[in-house]
Image (cartoon, rainbow, N blue to C red):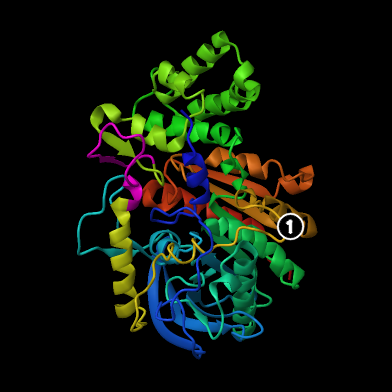
Amino acid sequence: MPSNTLIRVAIGLALTGSSLAAAEAPAARPHPADPAVTTATPPDRQVVTQHEVKVDGRTLHYKTTAGTLLTGDGKDKPGVSFFYVAYTAKADSRHPRPVTFVYNGGPGSSSMWLQMGSIGPVRVENNGDRPVPPPPYRVVANPETLLDKSDLVFVDAPGTGYSQLTGKTQGKDVYGVDQDAQAFARFITRYVTLNHRWNSPKFLFGESYGTTRSAVLVKDLQEQGMEMNGVVLMSSILDFSVAAPGIDHGYIVNLPTLAAIAWYHHRVPGAPADIKTFLDQVRHFASTDYTLALAQGDALSPADSQRIARQLGNYLGLAPAWIERAHLRIDPSRFRAELLRDQALTVGRLDGRFSVSEYDADGEEPSGDAASDAITGAYVAAFNQYAGTVLKFSEDRPYLATNYGVVNRGWNWLRGHGGWTQATYVAGDLGDAMRRNPQLKVFSANGYYDLATPFYATEFDLGHLGLPPALRKNISYGFYPSGHMIYLDLPSLKQLKADLARFYDAATVAPAG
């Protein structure tokens, strides 16, 4: 039977590279001993090192600045000491280099995942759709880095990584949809000013909840007089209403991802060899027959219920009788437990390609996330080693790769309009920003096997912004045979880089002369 798991999944989705706890009622301010909080006002700090990386056979020399940057005063304005790592290369004397601000989601996650896995000049060597072998972990040069197209500034959200709340600032001042975006806007404005980047082409690059942040942030910056050239949305969540009780939309937009995972594990009888062809069929079914069936609710005839259940069974590799008992509504967590039950395996939420054995092979839900378990230890260890030995930046306190227990639990999902936790909607902010700046480009990157932020939900949200045809052309998409962290699959990372290169070229057309 349908459960409230979908609600927990959508609210908890802030994923970046580890399983996450669902947002709960705001907690009290963390104890001052918490490494994410300091009553002091620490000065800005910078550690600069020089490096090189080969991209397309060409050696790219770059400077790395690992440091902290203070925003606000901790009194009238929330104070945050932001930790960041900036990778900058020498600019063409004729045109300023683009600069991209990069962050993960959570909302209580550091930017470590994107920095060490995707577009930075180094990456953790992983093991495809299998767990990373035990230490020592390997950090290798990343020829798929985006540094040849843009300078990169990886920013840890307040309360994560080495970023701290300062002075009298409390969690409620920065842990919230709008509060967080305002804090990031202050960081970006100060960084741009101190580094003389006002005339540089500028981009926002967020993953998971980072896409929620970007949708709000791009509009906030616009209202302060700072325009962006482009926004990269990786594994998006722009509308949390799919988590609301009694709403069938979540089941509809999840369906293509569920089918993709079943296809990957060879559970779809007679499926096309090409996943794109298969998913086109599933999208059509989801938006037509399936939508109409769910809309009828209890009035759906037994014959139609059986027909829809059979088709769902064909797409998902599940027994039609099981689907009918669930009223045609497939809870993602129950699907993860059911798909490979005959092998005593559950599949991952972040990446449905991953699977893991379960002690309770008859459980209703997985006990964890196979994908998160497979890579978290490697990323955390590798970044800590990299920060201390390569970036030469260290602190006498832990680096909080994630801080879900404090940040997520205290998160304010309301947006000043009397809304409720599960109604957070930011796609409209992005649409407003695109209307105000008709040159703003948006690239949406999606993994087929991502159950945390299903790709069809993103297609739906971006396809319902109410934009005129000329502005709709400013949105482009990339789809990859990977999961939430697209870059875990090396062929997908290579394709992602090629797609991003085209996107950046289109969004940074140099002025004539």
| Residue at (46% x, 34% y) in the render | 331
Can you tell which quarter of the image residue 466 is in?
top right
**Up-down: is 222 above or below 164?**
above
Q: Quadrant of residue 74?
A: bottom right
Quadrant location, the C terminus: bottom right
Residue 253: give x, y in percent of width and height: 56, 35
Residue at point 59%, 77% (across, down): 187
Is label 1 in a helix, a strand or a loop?
Answer: loop
In the visual, does 198 lie left or right of 309? right
The amino acid type, in three-letter code, at marker 1 is His
Magenta part, dominant SS? loop
Q: Is residue 213 magenta?
A: no
**Rendering coords of residue 461 (x, y %):** 65, 43
Task: Specify the segment rendered in magenta.
Answer: 352-372
Q: Which residue is tagged 1?
A: 417
Q: Residue at x 42, y 16 (%)?
A: 321
